[in-house]
Image: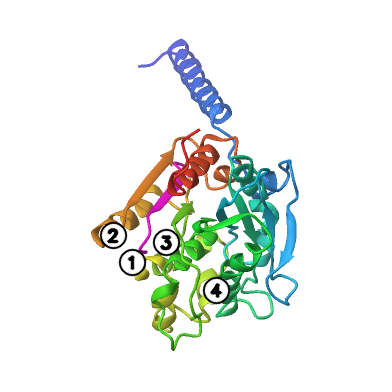
């Protein structure tokens, strides 16, 4: 039979154990890194605001051009922000710190704004024709700025990475496609940052990540209802991309988890593409857009590699 003192000792020991476990949990919570949010990226300082230039007549059809100092011509990075193809989530300001840092690294940048599915004329096909027209507009920009149109990399974050990868495949679009443009500007490579590379797969996770029906809103229908549209724009359906591509993501990224990124890379290699995957420990989906993080630095290195620039 347990005595009163024995029961008291047991209670004291149990309480001490609970306090110890609670202390460890709180310590672990304090030690966990605070992952950056979109608003954190939007507040990062810029060295230059860039030159805002229109590539179309809509108020959202513009880009920010940043050109390094010097004579050039300079290789070009076309930068595409993410945001689930949805207006309230992100705009060019979210990609501006990365564009600014790439320009400081000797690369001209064209940071593109475009209509998303909640904007008049956005979604299908406007979102895609906007970024296509923005890319082709680089030819016109090269007439007045020192840009090398033979060295162009598209770098996109999240949903913007899907657009960047799609841009590489435009030369293979049939002439009957509403997305077709004659003589599209060809890319040298693609850098996907926390990229959404499989729209069919992502559609099953969109509520938990974007919080809305992003994919069917972008396509104008569920993937199974508009399979021809899916086939024209989903990167995994467009393999091979036909140019080298690099994928950079944080190990804690739940929008572009490592296993899904690796699966896409394996499929691309099987189709003949040259692919590199870099997973940065302890960082999440938005940290990569901050140039001074390890993920942001990895993104800049990836762009430089694809442009054939000497590593810094």
Where does label 2 land, which residue?
Answer: 267
Q: Nearer the viewer, residue 137 or 279?
A: 137
Check the image and name the residue furthest to the bottom: 176
Residue 65 pos. (x, y %): 68, 56
Instruction: Look at the numbered disc 3 and give the secondary structure of its residue.
Output: loop
At label 1, counting other C-alpha atoms closer than 10 Å, the crowd grade (few under 14, some 14-19, many 20 or more) is some
Residue 212 pos. (x, y %): 57, 67
Could you tell me how far apart the alpha carbons at marks 3 and 2 are, in whole angstroms?
11 Å
* Label pair 2/4, CB-CB below 8 angstroms: no
Where does label 1 land, which residue?
Answer: 239
> Which residue is at a point 55% across and 24% down the rendered structure image?
27
Where does label 3 land, which residue?
Answer: 197
Could you tell me how far apart the alpha carbons at marks 1 and 4 are, in whole angstroms?
18 Å
Q: Quadrant of residue 165?
A: bottom left
Residue 128: mark: 4
Q: Quadrant of residue 41?
A: top right
Q: Start and end of the magenta stretch?
A: 241-252
Instruction: Look at the numbered disc 4 and give the secondary structure of its residue.
Output: helix
> Which residue is at a point 44% across and 57% down the rendered structure image?
188
């Amino acid at each position: 039979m347990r005595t009163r003192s024995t029961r008291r000792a047991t209670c004291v020991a149990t309480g001490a154990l609970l306090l110890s476990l609670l202390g460890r949990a709180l310590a672990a919570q304090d030690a966990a890194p605070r992952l950056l949010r979109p608003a954190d990226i939007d507040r990062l300082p810029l060295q230059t605001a860039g030159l805002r230039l229109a590539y179309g007549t809509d108020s959202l059809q513009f880009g920010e051009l940043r050109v390094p100092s010097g004579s050039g011509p300079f290789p070009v990075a076309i930068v595409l922000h993410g945001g689930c193809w949805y207006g309230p989530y992100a705009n060019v300001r979210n990609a501006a710190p990365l564009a600014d840092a790439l320009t400081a690294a000797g690369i001209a940048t064209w940071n593109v704004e475009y209509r998303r599915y909640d904007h008049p004329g956005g979604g299908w096909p406007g979102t895609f024709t906007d970024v296509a027209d923005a890319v082709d507009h680089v030819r016109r920009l090269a007439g007045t700025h020192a840009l090398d149109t033979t060295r162009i990399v598209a770098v996109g974050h999240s949903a913007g990475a899907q657009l960047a990868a799609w841009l590489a495949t435009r030369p293979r679009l049939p002439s009957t496609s509403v997305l077709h443009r004659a003589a599209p500007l060809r890319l040298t490579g693609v850098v996907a940052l926390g990229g959404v590379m499989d729209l069919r797969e992502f559609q099953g996770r969109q509520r938990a990540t974007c919080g809305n029906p992003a994919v069917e809103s972008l396509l104008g229908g569920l993937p199974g209802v508009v399979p021809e549209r899916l086939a024209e724009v989903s990167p995994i359906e467009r393999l091979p991309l036909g140019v080298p591509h690099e994928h950079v993501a944080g190990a804690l990224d739940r929008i572009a988890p490592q296993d899904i990124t690796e699966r896409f890379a394996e499929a691309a290699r099987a189709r003949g593409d040259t692919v590199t995957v870099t997973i940065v420990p302890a960082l999440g989906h938005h940290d990569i857009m901050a140039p001074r993080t390890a993920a942001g630095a990895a993104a800049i290195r990836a762009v430089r590699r694809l442009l054939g620039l000497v590593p810094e």
